Image (cartoon, rainbow, N blue to C red):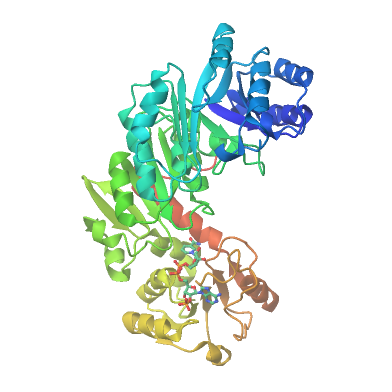
Amino acid sequence: MLCLSLTGSNCEISLSQYEKHKEVIQLVELRIDYLDSIHVDEINNLLKSISLPVIATYRRKRDGGLYEGPEKARLQVLKDMLDLDFTYVDIEDDIKRLDLEDKARGRSIKIIRSLHDMEKVPKDLFLRIMKLHKKGDIAKIAVMPRSLEDVMMIFKVNKELKDIPDKVIIGMGEFGIPTRILYKKTGSLFTFCSPEGEEAASGHLTPEIMHDLYHADRVNENTKVFGIIGNPVMHTSSPKIHNPAFYQLGLNSVYVPFLVDDVRAFFQLADLLSIQGFSVTVPFKQQVLPYLGKISREVKLIGSCNTVFQSNRVWKGVNTDFYGFLKPIQEELDSQRIRTALVLGAGGAARSIVWALRNYYCRVVIVNRTAEKAKNLAGMTGSSWRPVEELGSIHDIDIVVQTTSGGMSPYEDVDPSLGYEFTGKEIAYDLVYKPKNTRFLTRAEKAGCRQICGMDMLIAQGVLQFESFTGFLYPQKKES
Ligand code: NAP
């Protein structure tokens, strides 16, 4: 069940949150600690307007909630709530109040026994869940993973306790997001989400993202897991490329972002979750290489890999950036209208781009903020390089490719091409895809250049990834 936490400061706002999202959720949690003042009649009316089961939760600050008052008053409110038509009540594990439990059971309100650790994943996670479970209630544990090893521990414990149906195990924060999306895969009863901009707990996604993008409620034991690894990773648009295509083709697969701090740990997690394939973004495109059993010709050439998938039981690495970059300019390359290129940047992406251009016999000049890296890449690829200060003296260029992170949020003010004089005849190709109108492209547009935004390449490389992952052609958009 996808559970929406209602975080309104009054019942009216909470009701509007429910109304807005009710089509995509199956359960609601009323966060009483978010209400400015508690009026039993209003809460009663709210419950009458909600046609889904509702959890009563009155969360203390130390457990990630807003309540800071005396404990006695909090428990009295919770007890009063048991006169109303809640389906569940959340009682923290340390609360020893038989009267509260007896009242809930007497009214057939199911108890969720919850335990929160806002700092870490406790080492005895397994025992703690078993202890909660033995009380005969729904065991809920929300912990804070600080590394991918911690995330692995959550998945492991979840897997070991697969036969206990009445449990919820959640990893909070950015590391924990896969545990929220894949809750059904490992047997958690429900997962939580919040209205946009109203995150009730760190790592909550919106109901629409959980339902429309990840189809989290359709995931089951047999769902094939794909994903993207990076650090940072949550800004990625790749789930929007892969998940709708899985859905359109009726494939029982999901594509999930994994925040990674250690590539080795990720390969272990990939074994645990039987991950079938994944995209690789900054800073891991080179770090994955030692873990691959097979690599394609272009990975060997470039020394960087953005796509990894299972092939005959070994991990195979390919580089779809290489081909994805070429797609929007294929015609110009084939007809040799592009013969000279200026490449701005000398990082991981630049390596693919320079090799792709060199493969078409283009003459390439590389300019990078750190001149040494430009020099090295030029040496490796048979290109030339120039220091940034000499941008103004570079002429006769058919295409300028901007491969740096300059221009990408939060560096929107940066234009790494400053100093270069556009003639209007060049193609201006920016790898940055967020925002679409970078300073680099705006300046090129003013000069009359044809512009290509990074989104075109992102989609092209994603389509190729999809085909490597699934063996299916990427589906055409349905006609509306
Ligand atoms: P990377 O390996 O970290 O390299 C970053 C490059 O950007 C380096 O050359 C670095 O110069 C330069 N740079 C960073 N900040 C700069 C600034 N403020 N001013 C000037 N230069 C700056 O990263 P990457 O993998 O090459 O990725 C670079 C960009 O390409 C990212 O924005 C990424 O999202 C984008 N990308 C897009 C696609 C797509 O499909 N559209 C695919 C791959 C990558 P120094 O050497 O001096 O540090």
The residue sitting at the top extreme is 106
Residue 475: percent from the left, percent from the top? 47, 42
Q: Is residue 444 visible?
A: yes
The C terminus lies in quadrant: top right
Q: Residue at x 33, y 50 (%)?
A: 266
Q: Residue at x 39, y 64 (%)?
A: 322
Residue 3: percent from the left, percent from the top? 57, 28
Tell which of 268 and 112 is nearer to you.
Answer: 112
Residue 191: percent from the left, percent from the top? 51, 31
Tell which of 258 and 222 is nearer to you.
Answer: 258
Q: Residue at x 39, y 40 (%)?
A: 122
- Quadrant of residue 48 in the image? top right
- Quadrant of residue 300 in the image? bottom left
Tell which of 446 and 4 is nearer to you.
Answer: 4
Tell which of 303 and 165 is nearer to you.
Answer: 165
Q: Is residue 146 left or right of residue 414?
A: left
- Quadrant of residue 447 in the image? bottom right
Q: Is residue 79 left or right of residue 473?
A: right
Q: Is residue 475 visible?
A: no
Residue 116: percent from the left, percent from the top? 50, 36
